[in-house]
Image: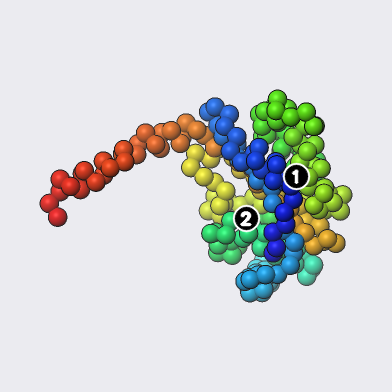
Amino acid sequence: MKFLEYTNLDSLNVFMGDLNLGERTIKGCLEAYSCKHAGTDKRLSLSLENEMLDYLGKSSDTDSSSPVDLLLSRSSRKALIYLVLTLYQMYPDYDFSAVKAHQFFSEESWDTFKQIFNNYMSEASKEWAERNEDGSLLEVIYKALDEVVKLAECEIYVYNPNPNADPFLEEGAIWSFCFLFYNRKLKRVAGFRFCCTSNLASDAFLADSPPYGEDEEIFADMDM
């Protein structure tokens, strides 16, 4: 996967990178990639394909929680592979194959994304409106994504893992979402992750931590 640079995405990331709202902080990041294999992508793709086929063979059609429909066709499996490879780029230190990430994608619509965004990013949108006069935050995000992946031609997915498979949960996390916008024709994926963390939890963590150097004083008094 090759990272694509877009000025409009960069300007949005500056605003959403660390938006302190008092008791809470909202963090958001938009990234775009071309579906061109690079580095270890080929090896990971083959491993993911085999993993999906193995899962497909063991899954039951009566299992309502099984994402079998997304795995039946080769083109769908290829799409999921691109999505997982995108996650690897967004979080390079996390092993998504170990948590079978392909099982946690669901296809959604723009309306679903819009509803979630409006519900959870309302404070960020108000902050944006106070600082900018070139449209609402959602409108600007739409235009930026449309420039990259042509939203009318996109498949929209949300990565919604269980807690053991969620790399987005940070210290004091309240909620997190990760949407991926995939255009098959352009062979591009845009990822948008946004989360909210509690500043109170962070302050409590810092309060419980010993002052710098205090741990050294403790060890200095011990007989080694």
Q: Is residue 25 left or right of residue 145?
A: left
> In the displayed structure, does residue 151 sit left or right of residue 222?
right
| Residue at 35% over, 36% down | 208
**Crowdedness near tag 2: few (<14), some (14–19) or many (≥20) residues, C-alpha within 10 Å:** some
Do the residues under discs 1 and 2 have CB atoms within 8 angstroms?
no
Q: Quadrant of residue 110?
A: top right
Residue at position x 53%, y 28% in the image = 23
The residue drawn where x is 47% and y is 31% is 200
* 71, 48: nearer the viewer: 48
Q: Is residue 14 visible?
A: yes
Residue found at the far left of this picture: 223
Tell me residue 3's x, y (percent): 69, 59
Residue 90: numbered disc: 2
Q: Amino acid at mark 2?
A: Met
Comparing 176 with 108, the one in front is 176
Give coordinates of residue 101: x percent, y percent.
Answer: 62, 59
Q: Disc 1 versus disc 2: distance between alpha carbons?
A: 18 Å
